[in-house]
Image: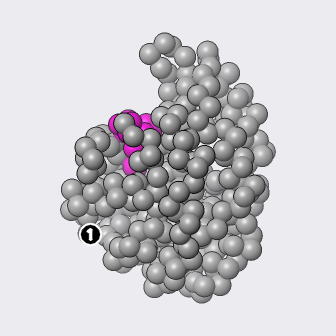
Amino acid sequence: MTAYADRSWTSRDGLKLHFRDYPGRDDRPPVLCLPGLTRNARDFAHVADRLAGEWRVLCVELRGRGESAYAKDSATYNPAQYADDLAELFRQEEIERAVFFGTSLGGLLTMITAMTAPQVIAGVLLNDVGPEIDPAGLERISDYVGQGRSFPTWMHAARALEESQTVAFPHYAIAEWLEMAKRCMAVGSNGRIHFDYDMKIAEPFAEPQGVSRVDLWPAITAIKDKPVLLLRGELSDVLAPAVHRRMAGMLPDADAVTVPGVGHAPMLDEPEAIAAIDRLLARVT
């Protein structure tokens, strides 16, 4: 495991937000890893381990996730606020440009940034997300987000994940479910294992605001001159094949890749994803 620094920045409404800072060359833009709705920096540990040294890698935890502070007002758990928090990270860290690796919600934030501040984007990986979200995937996510379940052992936690996520990772063995449990859960003060996020993030998600009414297709046009990787899980119920094809059609220079045998979302450790990431970074100047 590559050594990293646990660091923080402060949102404009005063929250202390956490990121992992992996060292890398200072003559390249950093890689900024943005996780999905309920996830945290640990999802990108294997990506950072592989790239660190050659690339500085920042693995961000959005407000209410992992070691980032929980918001007093659950209404601030929305994409516009997350994007504002990221803008503050760029300002406080004096980052001019970054390569955005956005998984799911992280990809939505990447698209919002493309529409509001395209100059900060040096390259883009959209991981299993696009301007339109398949309703089937939204419904599945809404069924589990914010439930607040806890478990007595890691094995119980892994089995619960297997029950709810097999549709996305049908080939996972129990060892892989245990690894996933340790990425997305933590041991609480009562000794039980719980999901590592504020359950209140589900409140705005249950009543979609803001981004759900925003046409994100202009974001695809905004990145047409950037190195772009459009990644889709073959079994995804979030990014429909037709949306993936339309994105690729709008970006003739983009690398559009489907990762076989997985759904939402590829973990970026699959051979096809690793090769595609290397091709993307080779194009970043």
Picture quarter containing residue 112? bottom left
Give how far across and how far down residue 49 sits, in percent.
44, 48
- Asked whether, in this view, residue 262 is left or right of residue 66, the answer is right
**Residue 221 vs residue 179, the one in the foreground:** 221
Picture quarter containing residue 194? top right
Q: Give the residues drawn in magenta, as a range.
A: 59-71
Q: Residue 244: tell me if it is visible.
A: yes
Give how far across and how far down residue 167 sits, in percent.
78, 46
**Residue 246 vs residue 207, the one in the foreground:** 207
Q: Residue at 33% x, 42% y: name it.
A: 18
Q: Amino acid at mark 1?
A: Glu
Q: Residues within 10 Å of mark 1 (few under 14, many from 20)?
A: few
Q: Residue 53: tell me if it is visible.
A: no
Q: Which residue is mark 1?
A: 96
Quadrant location of the C terminus in the rendered image: bottom left
- Asked whether, in this view, residue 255 is left or right of residue 70, the answer is right
Picture quarter containing residue 165? top right
Residue 12 magenta? no
Give how far across and how far down residue 234 sits, in percent.
75, 61
- Asked whether, in this view, residue 242 is left or right of residue 11, the answer is right
Give how far across and how far down residue 54 sits, in percent.
36, 61
Q: Residue at 27% x, 57% y: name it.
A: 88
Q: Residue at 47% x, 20% y: name it.
A: 188
Quadrant location of the N terminus in the rendered image: top left
Q: Is residue 117 above or below residue 24?
A: below
Residue 60 magenta? yes
- Asked whether, in this view, residue 43 is left or right of residue 247, the answer is left
Q: Residue at 71% x, 54% y: name it.
A: 137
Give the number of callouts: 1
